[in-house]
Image (cartoon, rainbow, N blue to C red):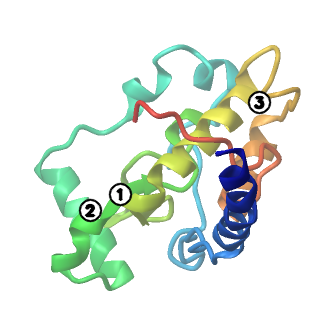
């Protein structure tokens, strides 16, 4: 039996090498011409860190899922040119998350304000949510996120530029989502 383990070690190492060297699908980013990211409200005062970091803040500004929201979602999918039969593969996501002061939902004049929403592939949603939580911790918590402390502006800029390359890295998603 000991000899079998010794012979299987090279096979195991070869398998680990092949799995580690296999290409990983790249995480997708939004089209920055359509979704550059937007913070705060369109006509309100600038948000303060104390507001955003208050427990339950995002629940107070998140729009309910109703007919108006469905029209908003439809406008976003159309803007991105995604056919209706593929919508189930995406989730409507805020590029700059609400918990970092991202613009939740609204209009500019009579047109939908789509600057902070994009069709995020569902397969990567947990990963982006983990980045959002880590950035929120880096801004709001006294200990930061693993020693990383950021201003709200730094976090917003980092996630709007490229959510896969922020100062907090790519944290491991929680298993309960």
**Residue drawn at x 52%, y 14% as measured from the top left:** 55
Task: Write down the residue under mark 1.
Answer: 92
Along the line of sight, the residue nearer the viewer: 170 or 144: 170
Q: Secondary structure at mark 1?
A: strand
x%, y% of residue 46? Answer: 64, 37
Q: CA distance from mark 1 to mark 3?
A: 24 Å
SS under mark 3: helix
In the rendering, which numbered label is found on residue 138?
Answer: 3
- Quarter of the image holding residue 108? bottom left
Residues marked 2 and 1 touching at CB (< 8 Å)? yes
**Residue 11 location in percent, x, y?**
68, 67
Q: Residues within 10 Å of mark 1 (few under 14, many from 20)?
A: some
* CA separation in Å, label 2 and label 3: 30 Å
Name the residue tied to disc 2: 73
Can the viewer see residue 113 in this picture? no
Cα gap from disc 2 to disc 1, whole angstroms: 7 Å
């Amino acid at each position: 039996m000991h000899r079998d383990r010794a012979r299987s070690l090279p096979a195991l190492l070869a398998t680990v090498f092949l799995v580690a060297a296999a290409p990983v699908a790249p995480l997708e980013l939004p089209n920055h011409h359509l979704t550059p990211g937007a913070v705060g409200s369109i006509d309100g005062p600038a948000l303060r860190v104390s507001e955003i970091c208050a427990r339950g803040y995002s629940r107070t500004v998140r729009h309910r899922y109703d007919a108006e929201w469905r029209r908003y979602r439809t406008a976003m999918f159309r803007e991105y040119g995604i056919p209706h039969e593929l919508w189930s593969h995406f989730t409507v996501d805020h590029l700059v998350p609400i918990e970092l002061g991202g613009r939740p939902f609204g209009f500019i004049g009579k047109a939908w304000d789509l600057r902070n929403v994009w069709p995020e592939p569902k397969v990567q949603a947990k990963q982006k949510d983990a980045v959002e939580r880590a950035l929120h911790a880096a801004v709001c918590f006294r200990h930061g996120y693993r020693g990383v402390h950021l201003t709200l502006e730094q976090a917003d800029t980092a996630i709007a530029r490229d959510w896969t390359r922020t100062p907090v890295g790519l944290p491991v998603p929680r298993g309960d989502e």
